[in-house]
Amino acid sequence: MTFPYKGYAGHYLDVDLTKGKIHKREMEKEWARLYLGGSGVAARILWDSTGPDTDPLSPDNVVVIGTGPLTGSMFSPSGRMMFAAKGPLTGVWAESHVGGFFGPEMKYAGFDFVVIRGRSPKHVYLFLRDGHAELLDASDLWGRETDITTQMIREEHKDPAVETAVIGTAGEKLVSYASVIVDVYRAAGRCGIGAVLGSKNVKGIACRGSLGLEVHDMDKYLEANAEEMAKLNDPLWTASLASLRKYGTTDLVAIINEIGRLPTKNHWTGFYEQADDIGPETIAENYRTTQEACHGCAIGCKYIYKVKEGAFGGGPAGGPEYETLMAFGSNCLNNDVESIFHMGTRCDLIGMDTISCGKTIGFAMELWEKGILTKKDTDGLDLSWGNVDSMVKLVEMIGKREGIGDMLSKGVRKAAEIIGGDAWKYAVHVKGLEASGQDPRAHQSVGLTYATNVRGADHLRSLSSLEELGYPDIVSERFGAEKADEILDIMSPKHKGEIIKDIEDLYALVDSAVICKYSTMWPPIYYYDTFVNVISPLTGMTEWSDTKYVKQAAERISHLRRAYNHRLGITRKQENLPQRLLKEPMPTGPAKGGLPDLDEMLDEYYDFRGCDRETGFPKREKLQELGLDYVADDLAKRKMLARGK
Amino acid sequence: MVTKESSSDLRKALAIDNNLCTGCRNCELACSVHHTNTFNPARARIQILKEEFRAMVIPMVCLQCDSPLCAEACPTGAISENSAGVLTVNHDLCIGCSNCVTACIYGGIAIDPLLRKAIKCDLCGGEPACIDACTYQAISLQSTDSHGLRGRSDSVRNLRTAYGLSEVDA
């Protein structure tokens, strides 16, 4: 039977690198109907093909490169795509999303998904064009940085519009947090998918397509689309969107420092006195040259920087986002913004996650301060806070895994294990993923977000901006007016289990559609009704016009990803926070004294999620209600179902 | 050659202000919906090229030239002004030879990958879909008199400078 739904390209590729064989297959109807696309479908594929015995850097691991029905379908902001695998940094569920133009182009080339298995005997890259795919020789590309690699691929095909998603030298060298770089300066940064591709001898994937996408009911879809765009264009959000266009995410440096949540000095505190030096005004006035947007996006948050002269002269290139400014800036007590531009761009060229890299350097700096690391451990580098020379050198050493860079290339959890002693106290991570730029001591629900995030300590699976920026009307509408006051209290744990469960489900759809967090996370405009509105006319999946069905699909994706992790040994014990964020009260700044009440929030979260409080395991009834019987059966065999009803 | 009717004269061309364009390519999507009822930028008559190494976006669309090189190069006479004065490709005559593509030095005409016939901007009969789709208000309809052409030229000044095609900003 042919795949019946529109909005999808309709095919996916199953690539067996070991045999050098590529199978072009029709999309599975049930994948679309039950898991939508992106993260949901990737979870379905990885559930079947990887598990506790899969070594992330072995041929057994599987990389899923995915888009969703909204990718390339003129919905704003939908220029995104995702990568998933079992993570080399964390050993659990790993997914990483990226904007730009690759995702839409992959669909125009005829493919919704690419599933990569095995290990190629030679260095290769995958090229897709108009329904065809081939593995091409990458021996000349191996050892090159991401910009040159992109240029060489475009030259080989004599087409400057070929889109690329490639790894740099860090991915080749299996740095645990190696990224995949799209369009030269956009990164699928987190979780080390670049290392998984590197372990498979895959330099990347490139595509060009003219097949286009059909729509089930174009008039109705465009109408629904216009309704959603009208929400975005409501005067209520004019200022927010203008700020995104002017500053991009750099604005967050100022906003977040103001509430005392800006990770500073390896997460010691949440307030950085020199934040202005690395903040939005400094950048906009002195370095920002222009603004760019991802495919079909009406927001346009990407900025381009140029440093005219000096040691860090460079650009034009994609400017560092908030997280990069935090990781290499406040986190390392470094207020030299030009050095951050430099290190951010170097990470894009080498192909490394700026968050994990900056956080690992901050961790090493704290160990230096405490005397746990000394000159004999650091190849003579002085790792005092804010020592820019040493930081710049460390970035290169980590990328090459040279000297101390080898240990730091494994991330803070592994490095702390290797160093031993008290080092673990300064390793700020959950499930092995270095914490991103938030702090639960200044924002209770961030604690729950970090603890329960299936990929580890970051904000992108369930961060709530509702109480951070205060949206009383939206909170009342979604959760009831009677709860609004407590929800809006950023330091109250009350109802946070309920809202984080709700937002995790919402983002599960966002990550499967695949669209951007902007307009969902912040400003909080799109909600479940958005998907109810647009998916059905786009695809022809009539079930998706029913709110109950859509919410259930969202929950299904959340539960499948959680179950994937249970099977790898994740229980309530690992859904935890690092000691610093859980036990050391915030020492300075506006959030001084703050600590998260994690246990209270977790209890409530598990209740709303349909899980057991003690273990975090799901209840059979819940899984059956979501049509995840196969998951329930598998977990039951492993004694990973909640006991009792 | 169709004679112009001055009353319904559409002697205009699209101008894209490079300072406002973010390279999101929504115009391409809107154009492809209007002309093909699908999302397919490769079949759009407006093209946004990007060059990450100079962080440039380069909009390409037909200039509706007074002395069109494309029409001159067409061996079958398929390109001519329609009744509104807009250069149009007659697909009954077009043989897809690409001579027009080679001849146009502005990248304003292309071969449709599906039809294998030349396609170019026809101004959507006076209400270009791309203008409506551009949330950054970068696209406008300019007259092809000297004033309009001056505006069109100014809007891409930074590109000419970046690529060394004209003197440093006047």
Image: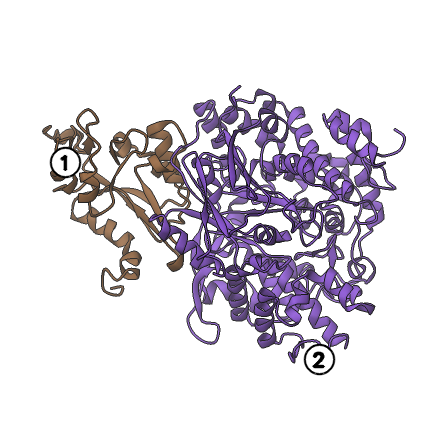
Front in this rendered view, residue A468 or B54: B54
Rendered shade, chain B: brown
Which residue does the numbered mark 2 point to in the structure image?
A376
> For residue A405, what is the image quadrant?
bottom right
- The colour scheme of the drawn protein is by chain
The one of A488 and A449 positioned closer to us in this rendering: A449
Position of residue A566 in the picture relative to residue A30 (left or right): right
Given the image, what chain letter belongs to the residue carrying mark 2? A
Instruction: Return the residue nearer the eye: A152 or A606.
Output: A152
Closest to the observer, A501 or A90 = A90
Q: Secondary structure at mark 2?
A: loop
Task: Answer few, some or many: residues within 10 Å of disc 2's Cα (few below 14, many 20 plus, some between 14 and 19).
Answer: few
Q: Is residue A476 visible?
A: no
Q: How far is mark 1 from mark 2, CA to CA?
A: 75 Å
Residue A450 rendering spot, x and y as whole percentages: 73, 50
Residue A72 percent location from the top left of the image: 46, 37
Q: Colour of chain A?
A: purple
Amino acid type, mark 1: Cys
Residue lying at the far right of the rendered structure: A644
